[in-house]
Amino acid sequence: MSNKKIQLSRMWKYFIDATMEIINEDGINQVTIRKVADRAGYNSATIYNYFGEVSHLIFFASMKLLKEYTEEVTESMQKGQTSLEKYMLAWECFCRHSFQQPAIFHAVFIMDLGDHPERMIERYYEMYPSDLINIPEELKPILFERSMTKRGKSLLQLVAQDGLIDERQVDSLNEMTNLLWQGMLTNILNNRLDYSLEEAQQKTLEYINQMVKNALIIKNP
């Protein structure tokens, strides 16, 4: 790595670390360019040499805070014996972590990041390649995909290939499950529901399970 790239990486991580500290101490809504600059020991103008806007700082810091989820979902899916079991284990882990950290998951999977958000995930793993060390090769394409729609579809297509659901059901089932999760998470963040985080997690999983059950192909004995 050239000296220029080393310097760029070092500065980039200074600002991400500062953003993570603010999120952990004050909450994600308290992150501003000025606060991050002050925490990192630089002026605000310097940040714009590395990040286009504050949402990008929040996204990258949130990605770093998802490391525990990323490692756990990988381990969980490996316990599944079938493609359907892997799909449901992935949802179970995703719901558990997302409703424990709704603002963080909103920042990564829902928040508007402008054009080409998928490039930002690539950028993240360029800066933190060690986060991929324990990730099986077959799961890496999913991690590089920010779109929940594309993530879920890739897993459901495997379920369809195994003859467990009709291929024609993939798009609608994928859309319904994703909209359910997004709606529940957004309502929780906006204080539109009386559910606790645990109740929101439980209900989301119950509804997803029911949707999947309704889509299963019933085979005659």
Image (tube, rainbow, N blue to C red):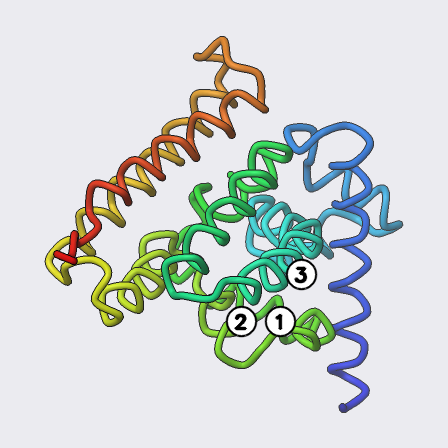
Identity of the residue drawn at 26% across and 39% down: 211
Q: Earlier in the sequence, mark 2 or mark 3?
A: 3
Rendering coords of residue 190 (x, y %):
48, 18
Task: Provide the secondary structure element on which disc 2 rests.
Answer: helix
How would you rate the neighbour count of disc 2 (Cα within 10 Å): few for under 14, some for 14-19, many for 20 or more? Answer: some
The answer to whether 21 appears left or right of 73 in the picture is right
| Residue that carries the numbered disc 1 in the rendered image | 125
| Residue that carries the numbered disc 3 in the rendered image | 71
User: In this rendering, is residue 105 above or below 156?
Assistant: above
Picture quadrant of residue 183 = top left
User: In this rendering, is residue 94 above or below 10?
Assistant: above
Instruction: Please name whichever residue, 164 or 43, is drawn nearer the observer in this view of the structure.
Output: 164
Task: Provide the secondary structure element on which disc 3 rests.
Answer: helix
Specify the quadrant that holds the C terminus.
bottom left
| Residue that carries the numbered disc 2 in the rendered image | 122
Task: Provide the secondary structure element on which disc 1 rests.
Answer: helix
Instruction: Please name whichever residue, 106 or 89, is drawn nearer the observer in this view of the structure.
Output: 89
Pointer 1 with pointer 2, Cβ within 8 A: yes
Identity of the residue drawn at 69% across and 42% down: 33
Identity of the residue drawn at 23% across and 47% down: 173
Furthest-top residue in this view:
194
Instruction: Please name whichever residue, 189 or 220, is drawn nearer the observer in this view of the structure.
Output: 220
Number of numbered discs visible in the structure rendering: 3
Furthest-front residue in this view:
221
Judged by depth in the image, the label closer to the viewer, 1 or 3, is: 3
Rendering coords of residue 133 (x, y %):
70, 77
Residue type at mark 1: give it. Tyr
* Disc number placed over residue 164 in the picture, else none: none
Residue type at mark 3: give it. Glu
